Image: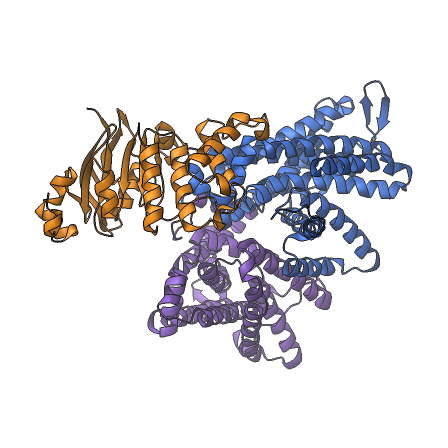
Chain colours: A purple, B orange, C blue
Amino acid sequence: MDSQLNMIPVLLLHGFVYGMLIFLVASGLTLVLGMMDIINFAHASIYMIGAFLCYQVTQWTSNFWLALLVAPVVCAFLGILLERGLLRKIHGSGQLNELLVTFGIAMVITEVVSWIYGSSPLPVAAPVQLAGSCQLWSGTKYPLYRLFILVLSGVVLAFMFYLLRKTRLGISIRACVEDGTMANALGTNVSFVLMAVMGIGAWLAGIAGVIVAPYLSVYSGMYNDMIMDCFAVIAVGGLGSLGGALIAALLVGQIQSFGVAFMPSISIAIVYLFMVIVFTAKPTGLFGKKE
Amino acid sequence: MTNILTLKGVTKDFDRFRVIDGVDLEIREGERHALIGPNGAGKSTLFNLITGHYVPSSGTIHFKDTRIDGLAPYKITKLGIARSFQIINVFKELTVFENMRNAIVAKQGLAVKCIRRLAVMGQVRNESEYMLDRCNLAAYRDELAGTLGYGQQRALEVGLAIALDPELVLLDEPGAGLSPEETRMIVKLIREVTAQKTLVIIEHDMDVVFDLADRISVLSYGVILATGTPKEIRNNTAVREAYLGTLTDNETA
Amino acid sequence: MKQNLKYASILLVVLLAILLPLVMSKFQIYLVTQVIIYSILGVSYYLLLGHTGLLSFGHAAFFGVGAYAAALSLLHIAGPDTPILLAILVGALAGMLCGLLFGLIVLRLTKIYLAFATLALSQMIWAVAWKWRDLTGGDDGLTGWAARTVSMPLIGQFALTNVTFSYYFVFFFAVLSIALSWHFTKTPLGNTLAGIKVNSHRMGFLGVNVNKAKLMVFTFSGLIAGLSGALFILMKKMVSPHFLDMSTSFDVLIISVIGGYASFMGPIIGAFIYVYLVEYLSSFTERWQLLVGAFFVLLLLFYPKGVAGIIGNALRKVSFVSGKGKR
């Protein structure tokens, strides 16, 4: 009984850790969705690519920090490449087509990755500085690496907050998400803003991929697991709403964490049930734009 | 003289912004009533409230003896109120005939029938073609509605509302963007098809308003400034200040 | 003239289909049977997506629920004496109820939210099938009717393992369900749904109960999909949670897109192409999924209307050249 109660703060921490990871990936997705009404299925593929890049870099150099530096940048480039090369081309032919193309690309990327690396999980060691656990309070230890994830996500979150609230680019982004046509009419270079959003979003997804590697290891099923959680988060939070995505991500993280601990037999279904409940109460998500 | 539409104390708030601020309005059965006022006064919002697209924040709306505020748009339409839209809202990817047929199918209560094929229902085809004729759109029967000239799209926009054979017709700026000739034609159409009906029309074209209307209501900042005959409205100082501007000698009654 | 051409070609196809088993190997007949079942499923999906514009990511639910319902009725209603036709009926009805349920829940949702909600609902059902071992056999699924026979009035008994019989049996139901679906699109309801796809907002203001129409198409789509699920388990002699999986929902989407998701014939063409493409590719490489994915992307980039669109363009050119085309 005592250990059950003791578990709760730990489970809360687990929930936050996982929630923040989902948020890092979902944030880029929801912004692009809010701006262009495109669901980019391939966004979670970039997350997976980030993880595999981390694996590869640590294989070559045994330096996790290098991976953390390099991989997200590569991912950012991939994101921009995706936007320029593909999404631009099909932007005219209808929303459904765009959605399906990104879905197809995601499929192809997953296949290529499992072709190169096989389908077994590949472990990545946490950097030496972050190995082991630390004492939180009497009787409770917590892996240091996971605390690192929390801290890093917190820093990234603060950076995003600053970007969106205090910089011109941030204001442009928010304007474009709110009303792209109006923003364009007022002189914002929507095309550039879109590129920036894709790039930053992909960069964030790459960071998430890198930091999740030591945590959950690297495997080709990462895409599937993440895409469902992403969808749950942006749908529940409301399309285009960053704040909504954050709250939803933390909620989903907690649901996963507590669900697995207390109700393992139905834990896979709880997130879906949660989604459906939110939808029946609020058809456009918690903070979504009303039609 | 009975009232076919009664609004009592209707307000509408969007978050903290009050768009409609306590509107009382009575539309008499069989009259042609114009709703005028500066842009942003809330005229289209009022239409949206009447037709069920919005729910009033307070107040009531009655159609004859039935309370209609809070009902779904399709239910209100079925009771006998039809509207056209300020921004053209036809089925652009369908042919003109298919557009009109959608209205006729709905009017004949066949919209969700799924036993017989639509193609064998002669009464639907006949009535659709008849309505197209009345709107002078028969020549464009098989064209996609989105490819029509603006004037024809306007006629179709109005035609779809009329095809439902409603008791109360709400037309939202049916003349918007039309040339003088096209305006003449649409006013003629409106006059013909609303002969036995009640009409409420939002318009900015004062010639159309004073030509068609039996009574006029002036809406400004969500409040009705005045209701009366065209002569009364023309001479109303408050209205002149808010909307019509000063009159020349030619225009005084 | 065009009408007669249409009827003639349909008759030709039906005739070909009837004669096919005489010239094909058992394995090939088995493959075509699979294609036909996917066609039925694809058409049921067309009713939602291509015809009404409702993007569902959870269509596997209708298929899988029909499959499980049929399987369970074969195993539990009257044991080995359960009439096969009853199982098919149960499967179809189960799919129909599933469609009704989904429809009720997602009525007010649009576009992406609709897609996500249908995905979530379908995943929930998948989770139930996976976990409820007592009822569904869990991950192992259910089997046990492989040795059964179908009694056809006047003709006699046929084993389910009789590939040729299964083919004709499935083909019969395909003709029935596809014809029914075609008829559905030609009714006033079908017309209303097509209007909802174009402008559901105005439809409401014409006095149409849009929600009721949507509910009806979800229900009917579920019926046809459930039927295809029931037929599938008869053919495969087993049922597993994979039938309810997200990937099955996306398979239906892929089939629709390859054939052309906005046309009635699209999913039928798509089913043929997909099954044979997968069969062909998997025979010489393990990486067939990669090739199918690449094919899918290229098709979307260059021929978004799918193969039906390519055929349609070709036909239009022909009729234009021969002077019969209009616009």
**Picture coordinates of residue B140, whole percent (x, y):** 50, 43
Seen from the viewer's position, the closer of residues C274 and B129 is B129
Residue B156 position (above or below residue A166)? above
Seen from the viewer's position, the closer of residues C63 and B134 is B134
**B49 left or right of A176 in image:** left
**Picture coordinates of residue C123, whole percent (x, y):** 58, 45
- Camera sees residue A134: no
Residue C40 position (above or below residue B13)? above
Residue at 33% over, 38% down: B188
Residue A42 position (above or below residue B104)? below
**B217 left or right of A268 in image:** left
| Total tally of numbered discs in the picture | 0
Classify residue C1 by image quadrant: top right
Residue at the limit of the structure toward the top, as seen here? C154
**Picture coordinates of residue B206, whole percent (x, y):** 22, 47
Quadrant location, the C terminus of chain B? top left
Classify residue C136 by image quadrant: top right
**A149 left or right of B74 in image:** right
Seen from the viewer's position, the closer of residues A246 and B20 is B20
Quadrant location, the N terminus of chain B? top left
Residue at 66% over, 27% down: C90
**Picture coordinates of residue C194, whole percent (x, y):** 54, 40
- Camera sees residue A251: yes
Residue B152 position (above or below residue B199)? below
Seen from the viewer's position, the closer of residues A4 and A62 is A62
